[in-house]
Amino acid sequence: ILLRHRHQATELLQILIQAQQIEGWLPAATLTHIAAALGLPRARVEGVAGFYSFLYTQPVGRYRVLFSDNITDRMLGNAELLDALCRKLWIEPGHLSEDGLVSVTTTSCTGLCDQGPAMLVNGRAIGQLSHRRINEIAELIRQQRPLELWPAEYFQIDDNIRRRDALLGLDMPPGAALQAAVARGRDGWLAEMQASNLRGRGGAGFATAVKWASAKNAPGAPKVIVCNADEGEPGTFKDRVLLNSFADLVFEGMSLAAWAVGASQGFLYLRGEYRYLLPQLEAVLARRRAAGLLGTGILGQAGFDFDIAIHLGAGAYVCGEESALIESLEGKRGTPRIRPPFPVTKGYLGRPTVVNNVETLAKTCLIALGGGEAFAATGTAQSAGTKLLSISGDCAMPGIYEYPFGVPISRVLEDCGASDTQAVQVGGASGICLAGYEFHRRIAYEDVPTAGAFMIFDGTRDLFDVARAFVHFFAHESCGFCTPCRVGTSLLKGFMDKLADGHGAQADLADIDWLDRLLKNASHCGLGSAAPNPVIDTLQKFRPAYERRLVSLDFEPAFDLDAALAEARQLTGRDDSGAHLKTHEEDEK
Ligand code: SF4
């Protein structure tokens, strides 16, 4: 493994992932050996190994079962299925079986919300879990049957494309868009991109041509193109479908970016949960190399040299943030950088780097083929083109829908067969929760921007539970670098748990407000500032879901202190009034 990665420290994460594949986990001796071989301090190697959820520095089962734990998986009953599997295997959730055979626990959203409940077994995705399937899986694990011999239909992941528009309806031979762009020349192609008004599909909506031009004009070489395929936002799975069935468009988009910017090195950063797509993506890259669409002198253009390597992530949501992703690509912990400088001037190894979303890059093929003006003519004034939505939750037809920007929420709900809809969470956990009176609003940067997640909750759902699940997610995914987020997300989680346990008071709602301001103003990156969004939105729009959990109007402790002293009373043999704490009501008297 070390030789394959040329003993380079930038490959540390990939080396750890591959070492773990052989040993099942990362024993201390392995970390020591890797540190010595790479000439790195052992603490650095251990720090990286400890950062990523899918790297294990303690033994895990030969079968590692991770249940997807997005709110939509919960709505489909993942908790009962997890319990059922654990009962059948005689293990506790979160623990390793005594014989080392199996461990079962949860992970954040696995990008299979349209076919949940879902799980990963040794990195392989299995969707549409049912009690029958769980029984069969328990038996296969007990028999220690290798995963390759499990029924193939378990691992079948459907695209579930329900509505196609310009992108999903495109039938393009590999290389056609690149040929069109090369024929325009580098400057002509960049001008076409400027005319298209394409904005990044990752959620922020930054103008793609501006990003490319900045990297093109920045000093430093070789320049780098990164495709951000770390689709970790709960409820989003459109990139899974693009990578599964439209990989040529994505890789071609990377080459189009390289042609405009003058880049020679490309990375596709693939989220660990999509590792099962790796062999087919490598096969597409090999085909493109054989066709002369990657390598040196592409399409006969002297100086157009570009190739792409795939790097795997390992279960860290924060790596979706572009500077954290670059840190991870450099083999470090995925901690967001202080900006400026921005990646377009100082990115991967200090070189000018463009980081684009999977969908953004695929869309550039449409512009190369049809021209910038034609692209800009679709969608709305500030949001050109179409948007892929990942639709899940309470609807008859979850899946992928492509719409021109400007489509109203109500139209989307109608198309996917949703009824009695109480709320829609657009943009994932960090997005916005829309109530019924807002369903006239439109998907567009000027109204409701989104990276693509569209989760539907009908009238039977408790929006407090939805917000609480998202808050738990953020507390788990905080990278811990800055105190406001590390402590603030944990406090927020504590407040939501206190309310859920029936100990909530009005004062807690005021404290939640205060935490919102703190997280928004003092967090180092978008994760921290977005963390309170689900709570604040649902507090404003579904306040009764919170108020019915309030016990006292002023203060209610998070736990019963007198009950907690019961063991001490028993040990000392005392149960007189002096051994009890007075209640708030007794104090009042
Ligand atoms: Fe890390 Fe949170 Fe700070 Fe972002 S805001 S750097 S995720 S601790």
Image: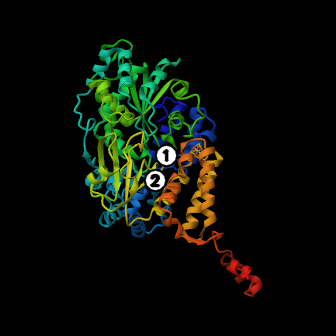
Which residue appears farthest toward the right when viewing the image? 578
Q: Is ligand 1 within 8 Å of the beta carbon of the residue shown at mark 2?
A: no
- Residue occupying the point 53% across, 55% down: 536
Name the kind of residue labelled 1 in the image. Tyr
| Circle 2 SS class | loop
Which residue appears farthest toward the bottom when viewing the image? 576
Query: Residue 574's spot in the image, x, y percent?
Result: 74, 86
| Circle 1 SS class | helix
Considering only vertical position in the picture, is 95 above or below 168? below
Query: Residue 52's spot in the image, x, y percent?
Result: 52, 46
Cβ atoms at labels 2 and 1 below 8 Å apart: yes
Snapshot colouring: rainbow
Q: Which residue is mark 1?
A: 317
- Residue occupying the point 42% across, 29% down: 208
Q: Which residue is mark 2?
A: 108
Residue 306 at least partly seen: no
